[in-house]
């Protein structure tokens, strides 16, 4: 969503400095395009090829990755070209308007995708019963959210392609958003409204998860007590026929998965439906002692969130934090430039915050590999096969 009016002109810098900046912008821009394209293509391929990654959260992540990928393909090459020319636009103005439209739309789509993810998480975690949250496929509500993100992003960007940039005395050597009112409007719609909503929704999501975890731990303790009673009853039933052959009842261990869950107070190890047989001593099993089994129906009655969904929940705040860190300076400077016409914003500052915003599109795939085990496995497998 850049201004693309980075005026590193001959009046601002010496000729040697301009030339050096131009080549640095070219090298950095090409490297950034390659990183963004490669990383986001891997994200899309991983969800398409890996069954373990086909979750609701990851479909939204694919939509976000697609927006970043289109940014690298459709916007950054022309932006890098303009930077290499010293901020001077030498192409057709229709192409400039197309560039501005795609820039606004793709940046807006990125933040709207993040906002849609926060809405989805809030509705199905903090509001709905967690029992109904273990979803593998996209339903109509997710399709509506995904469609809405792109339609709203297109609506925000459409005034540019419909001629709002055609102002009198337009400078053909600059490619930027010409209407200051539209700059404020697009910034408010794309950033200053969705971001606070997203932060508040995530706060509600994690409060809901915290309350759900406390309730789950209480149920777990009750289940352990019930499990012990069942174990003692099973032992008492099995021992009378074996009187005189076995010295006495041996202590019955709890299922390892319950002991581990209680000891660590974590949710990581008991999320999938489990049909766990309680381990009995060998001599008891050999004499046909009845076993206690956790049925799938009992497991499904426990309010559980799928492990992969919860791991994705850990990634998303990092993604949102990086987005805010990268794009907040740009939107603040961009809006200030439109509102305060007398303010002198140095061109290097405008260029820096613009590059920082584009860097965010390269960070998301890196974040996935660091914080998400399933993505990390797929990425490692790809690198091993290639290298």
Image: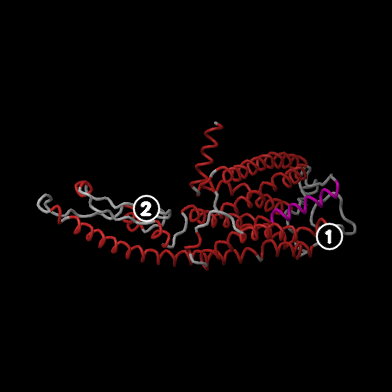
Label annotation for residue 275? 2
Determine the residue positioned at 78% across, 63% down: 182
Q: Quadrant of residue 215?
A: bottom left
Who is closer to the viewer here, 323 or 371? 371
Q: Which x, y percent locates residue 350? A: 71, 54
Disc 1: which residue: 164
Q: Which x, y percent locates residue 334? A: 72, 59
For the N terminus, give its image quadrant: bottom right
Q: Residues within 10 Å of mark 1 (few under 14, many from 20)?
A: some
| Main SS, magenta residues | helix
Residue 328: in sight, yes or no? no
Secondary structure beneath disc 2?
loop
Determine the residue positioned at 42% across, 55% down: 271
Label annotation for residue 14? none
Q: Quadrant of residue 138?
A: bottom right
Specify start and end residues of the magenta stretch as a single range.
Answer: 92-107
Who is closer to the viewer here, 243 or 182? 243
The verdict on residue 386 being magenta is no
């Amino acid at each position: 969503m850049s201004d693309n009016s980075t005026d590193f002109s001959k009046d601002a810098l010496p000729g040697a400095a301009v030339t050096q900046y131009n080549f640095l912008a070219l090298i950095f821009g090409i490297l950034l395009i390659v990183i963004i394209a490669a990383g986001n293509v891997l994200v899309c391929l991983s969800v398409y090829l890996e069954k373990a990654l086909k979750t609701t959260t990851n479909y939204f992540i694919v939509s976000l990755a697609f927006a970043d990928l289109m940014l690298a393909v459709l916007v950054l090459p022309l932006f890098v070209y303009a930077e290499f020319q010293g901020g001077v636009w030498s192409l057709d103005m229709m192409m400039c308007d197309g560039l501005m439209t795609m820039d606004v739309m793709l940046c807006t789509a990125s933040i709207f995708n993040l906002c849609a993810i926060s809405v989805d998480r809030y509705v199905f975690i903090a509001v709905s019963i967690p029992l109904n949250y273990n979803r593998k496929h996209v339903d109509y509500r997710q399709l509506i959210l995904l469609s809405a993100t792109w339609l709203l992003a297109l609506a925000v960007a459409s005034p540019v392609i419909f001629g709002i940039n055609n102002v009198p005395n337009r400078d053909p050597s600059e490619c930027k958003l010409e209407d200051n009112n539209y700059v404020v409007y697009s910034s408010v719609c794309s950033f200053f409204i969705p971001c606070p909503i997203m932060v508040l929704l995530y706060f509600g999501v994690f409060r809901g998860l915290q309350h759900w975890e406390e309730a789950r731990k209480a149920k777990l303790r009750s289940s352990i007590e019930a499990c012990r009673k069942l174990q003692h009853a099973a032992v008492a039933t099995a021992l009378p026929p074996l009187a005189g052959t076995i010295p006495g009842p041996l202590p019955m261990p709890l299922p390892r998965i319950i002991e581990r869950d209680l000891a660590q107070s974590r949710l990581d190890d008991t999320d999938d439906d489990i049909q766990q047989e309680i381990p009995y001593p060998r001599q008891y099993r050999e004499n046909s002692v009845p076993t206690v089994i956790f049925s799938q129906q009992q497991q499904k009655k426990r309010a559980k969130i799928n492990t992969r969904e919860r791991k994705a929940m850990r990634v998303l705040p990092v993604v949102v934090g990086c987005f805010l860190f990268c794009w907040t300076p740009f939107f603040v400077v961009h809006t200030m430039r439109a509102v305060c016409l007398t303010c002198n914003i140095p061109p290097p500052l405008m260029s820096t915050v613009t590059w920082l915003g584009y860097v965010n599109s390269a960070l998301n795939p890196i974040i996935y590999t660091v914080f998400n085990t399933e993505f990390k496995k797929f990425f490692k497998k790809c690198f091993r096969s290639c290298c």
